[in-house]
Each structure stands twice: as structure tokens, then as C-alpha cells.
Image (spheres, grey):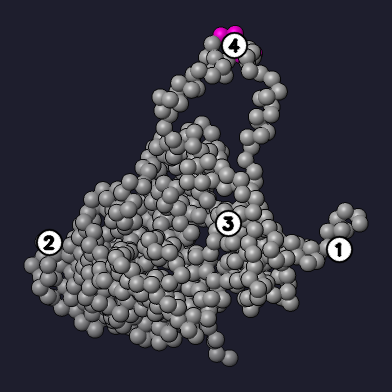
Amino acid sequence: MSDTIHLLPDHIANQIAAGEVIQRPASAVKELMENAVDAGATQIRLIVNDAGKALIQVIDNGKGMSVGDAQNAFARHATSKISTIEDLFQIRTMGFRGEALASIAAVAQVSLKTKRAEDELGTLVEIENSKVIECNSVAHENGTSISMKNLFFNVPARRNFLKSNSAELKHIIEEFTRVALSFPEILFTLSSNGQDVYHWEGGSFKQRAIQVLGNQYQTKLVAVGEQTDYLTVSGFVGKPETARKTRSDQYFFVNRRFIKSAYLHHAVANAFEGLLPKDSYPSYILYIDVDPSQIDINVHPTKQEIKFEDDKIIYAFVQAAVKHALAQFSIAPSLDFSLDADIQQLDAIQKPFTADKIQSATSHSLYAGFTQKNQAHLIPKSEKAGNSDLENFFTNIPSSHSQSNEMGEMQVSPDSYIVKSSSMGLYKEEEGLSVIEDTVLLQLHQTYIIAPTQSGCIILHQQLAHERVLYEKYQKASIQPHATQKSLFPVVLELNPSDAILLDEMLEDLAIIGYEIESFGNNSFIIQGIPADILSGNEKNAIELLLEQFKHFSGEVKYSKREKLIRCMSRQMAIKAGQSLTQKEMHSIIEMLSQCDIPNVTASGAPTYVEFKEGYLDGLFSR
């Protein structure tokens, strides 16, 4: 019998290895840019066409390669970084295993031009399907230019798994940004299809952070800096107002290598505890410098996951560094980090302590109890003490049915909350929302609406109910597009490139809902009109929030792009929990909800209201 186990040919083995390292065009961008950094470049230029599917080219002014090095660079595991196994635990460069160029050459048509400063001529090497097809001397400037064309040309099945150009370009921008943040002293440029996307001059870490995050972060970053014998933590965290619904602006770097670590993210999130609203994530760019012998970066082909020798020490140092930074800038308390963030919003904290208030405070008997000796238990006798004080206390309490006039005084108006229904009736009894007409509704905690029905009562969640109303409204817009309200003064919206790509994809669907937005070039857009039923004046913020919501839904692959947009719009535009409503507004929500096709649940399946029957209520009291 013949043997059944055989060795794979080199070109097939290289293609299999490429599947671990080069998963998409962005993977090749990362590897080529890191090689340029290792070459000592001070200027790195990235050129992509067709989102990297047609061309990826990286040009640097590094030290270049000799003829022999240029040829050997594409061999599997050819490297100048390690010689022994111990070298793996002293790595401070980006690339070290020598698998990147071999993997790229196995799945693309590669052309390499390189020249050292001491050489008169450079070297040209062209490789296709892991085979060298040309090697000549050429005129070239100092440095290296490597281009790869037609990614996965010889593996068409894998090419079919690539996403749309906008999606792939978004991943390329992410990898480009991560490398640029790691090395702010280097000039980075990015061009896509002949159009300049980024041009970032070299500078400090703060300057690079502003270049990446945007000028709006100029005054919204808090510096982090803690140095110990074991490690150094530095970088920046965003103030609480920069928190987002997605983790798009979160970067961890260990020895200038970008990593993904849910464990360290939890450390930062704990430092922000009590400062951020629910389901919001802080923005940060943090650099950890630690002895290479304390970490293992050779645990994943993309080297974005590493192992620490002592995870708990790293966690504690990161958390403490962020807490200390927030405390130094008076964003968080320096003694008690569990203090409720709502306390910072109280009038006593926010408003200035004027001279009149000082006089009023110091003249009070309580002030003496805290500032003078032997006064703690002194209760001064009031000349006007008597039953009249108790009477005034209760008679001056405003009614729960009162409202303030323009002068700020409280005026009782018991009938002001009662809304008369139309002759047709507000609600359809056959659909379960048989709310009694001409009744006063109760808003509980500015979130729930309690309404009596013929057979009991309902408790309705105002935000979820309004989300259902808007969801069905936007769904029907595909049949009959919504009216657009033209803006008297169009608003210019500037976005980062990844958000600009996302918004450009959404323009057609936004137009159906009622938005009129035009591309203005250079990642800018002009908002010419908004849906007719939305108040103007906050168009820019509304679109930015919509993009955040859309990215929050990006993991829901089972929904179409339009479905995601409709869900985002209904969630964003809905009346929020905690918003005070008038009787007319509460009745209006119930009436609109009763006219929905599916009034009892939101699009995500959450109930919009709960009904309590009279029999159930009687049972609670054993009746």
C-alpha cells in the first residue's frame, strides 16, 4: 500500500498561511506599514485603489534593502529580528516572524523597489504566486516602495468573501489609524482612488490624538501619566461628555503595538464608574510601556492579542492611572471614586457662590453651629415661633396640579391637565388600549404613563411606546416618502473619513425618511433639509448621534441596512425617559400607539405597555 500522507507544495502552504495573516486588504496594510516603521522611516505614504482589492502600495523613506535582502524577504520565516528562541521575549519591533511578505506574495502580485543610501542603484523584485518572475537593478530614491495588486487573484473563493468597498476601506482606515497613533513622530499620508484622505504631520502624542479624534477633542482630553519600576502608563482619556454608544475611539498600545483587551478595557471602565451614563463607553488612547520579558506577543497570527505575566498588576496600574488623571483635572473626586456623578450636577456645585449667598449663609444659626465653639447643640429661640410656622409650611406647598407662569410664580390650575377628546374618540377599544376618555393621566418618574381603562389600568413606557410609533411611521415611508423641511441656513457637517463613508452609504435611505443631505467633498456634507416633523436647530448633532446608533447596530447582521437605519431613527427621535410630558402629549402618545399595527411591543421585542385587569388588582388585596 502507498503512503497517504504527503507534503504540501510550497505555494499551497504559503496560501494556507496567508489565510491566518492576510484576511482582508486591511491586514496587508497593517503588515506593510509596520515593516516601514521597522525600517526607520520618517515618512510613510499609503495608496489604495478599489479599497485595496486592486492596489495597495506603501512608500517609505527608510533604510532600504540590499539585493540579497530584497530577494530573501519573501521567503517564509525570513527575518532579521530573531536568532534564538529567547529573542522572542525581547521583541520591541513590529514585525519579527517573517511571515507577512511571504503570505502577501502567495495571494497577490507583488512589486518591490528598494534602495539603501550607500547604493548607487536600487533593486526591483516582482513576485507572483510565491515565484520570483523578475529581479533587476533600477533607479530609485532611498527607501522602499512595495505594491501588491489584485489581492486573492489566485484564490477567487476567498476574494468572494470580501465585503463592499466602503466596508473594506473602513477597515483599512482603522489599521492606518492604529499605526499612526503608535508612532506620532512619523508623517503619514493616505490616498484612496487618487483622492487624499489623510495627511498627518509628525508631532507629539497629543497632536496625533487630535488629528485622529478631531479638533473637537482639543479641550476634551485628560492627560494620563504614571511611571513605576514595573511599567509606565501614558496617553489620554476623553472627558465624560465624549462618551459614545460604541467603542470606536478606544485604543490600547503595549510597547507601541496596538492590542485588543477586554480585560484592560474593564479597568478603564471601572475608573469611569459613576461618571458615564448607562451603555456609554469612554474614549481613550493609552500607551503601556513594559519590559518585553513580561509579555508574550507571539500568541496570535495578527499579534493583536498578547499575554501578560501578571494580568492583575497591569489591571490595577491602568485603573489607578486613569482614576488619578480624572481626579487631577477635577473630573472625578480624588478621595471617593464611588461618588454619584449626579451630585456634580446639583445647583450647589454648578452655580457660583455669590456675595449675597455668602451673607445669607453666614447669618444663619446653623453657620454658627459649625464655626463657633460650644454652639453645636444650641437651638436659638425664635420670636415668631408658634403654630403659625407649621401652618405656613403646609399652606405654601404648591398643588401637584400647578404650573409656573412667566414670572416664575406657581399658579394653581386644577383643570389645566384635563384634555377633552374629539367626537371620534382617542382610542380603539378593540385593540386593548381602551383608556377612559376625558381622564387625567399620571406620569410616574417622568418615564411611565399610568392610565385607567374600562377593566383596570395600563402602565405605558413613554420612550418605548414612541419608538413603536416612529418605527412604523418610518417603515411606511418607503411606500410614501416623508416631506422635507428645507433649511433656511444649510448646516455643514464635518466627519472623520470612516463616518463619512458610512453616511455616504446612508444618503439614499435618509432621503426617503425626509433628510436632504449632499456630499460637499473632503469628508464634509451639507444638510439642506430635515424631516418636516422634526424641530430644526439641532441637525448636526442629530446626524452624529444617528451614526453612533447605526454603528451600535452594526453587529446585527440579520437586519438590512434600511432596517438598521429605521431602528436607529426611531430610537433616537423618540421621547426619552425622564422627559416631563403634558396631559395633551401623554394622550397623544396613547392615541398614536393605538393606531399602530403592533402596538404592544417595540421592534426589538420590548413591551410598550403592561395592562393590569381589575380581577388581578382585586387578587392583590385578597378580594
Q: Mark 2 falls on what kind of element?
A: loop
Q: Does the rendering let one see residue 176?
A: no
Can you tell which of label 1 and label 4 is closer to the viewer? Answer: 1
Q: Residues within 10 Å of mark 2 (few under 14, many from 20)?
A: some
Amino acid, disc 1:
Gly
The residue that appears at 88% across and 53% down in the rendered structure is: 621
Lower position in the chain sequence, tag 1 or tag 3: 3
Residue 391 colored in magenta in the image:
no
Q: Is residue 105 above or below residue 372?
A: below
Amino acid marked by disc 3: Leu
Q: Is residue 478 left or right of residue 433?
A: left
Circle 2/circle 1 CB separation < 8 Å: no
Label 2 vs label 3, nearer the camera:
3
Residue beneath the point at 69% across and 20% down = 386
What numbered label is drawn on residue 581? 3
Q: Earlier in the sequence, mark 2 or mark 3?
A: 2
Q: Which residue is label 4 attached to?
A: 375
Q: Residues within 10 Å of mark 1 (few under 14, many from 20)?
A: few
Find the magenta span and give its range.
373-377
Name the side, left or right, on which 175 lies relative to 43: right
Going from N to C along the chain, the mark reached first, 4 or 3, is 4
Estimate the x, y position of residue 483 in percent, counting from the top left. 42, 77
Dot 4 or dot 2: first in sequence order is: 2
Residue on which the image places disc 1: 615
**Residue type (three-letter) at the residue carrying disc 4:** Gln
Per the model, the C-alpha gap separating discs 4 and 2 is 84 Å
Q: CA distance from mark 2 to mark 3?
A: 73 Å
Name the image quarter holding the C terminus: bottom right
Q: Provide residue 439's location: percent of width, then percent of height.
A: 70, 61
Residue topped by disc 2: 117
Residue 376 falls inside the magenta stretch: yes
Is residue 219 in view from this perspective? yes
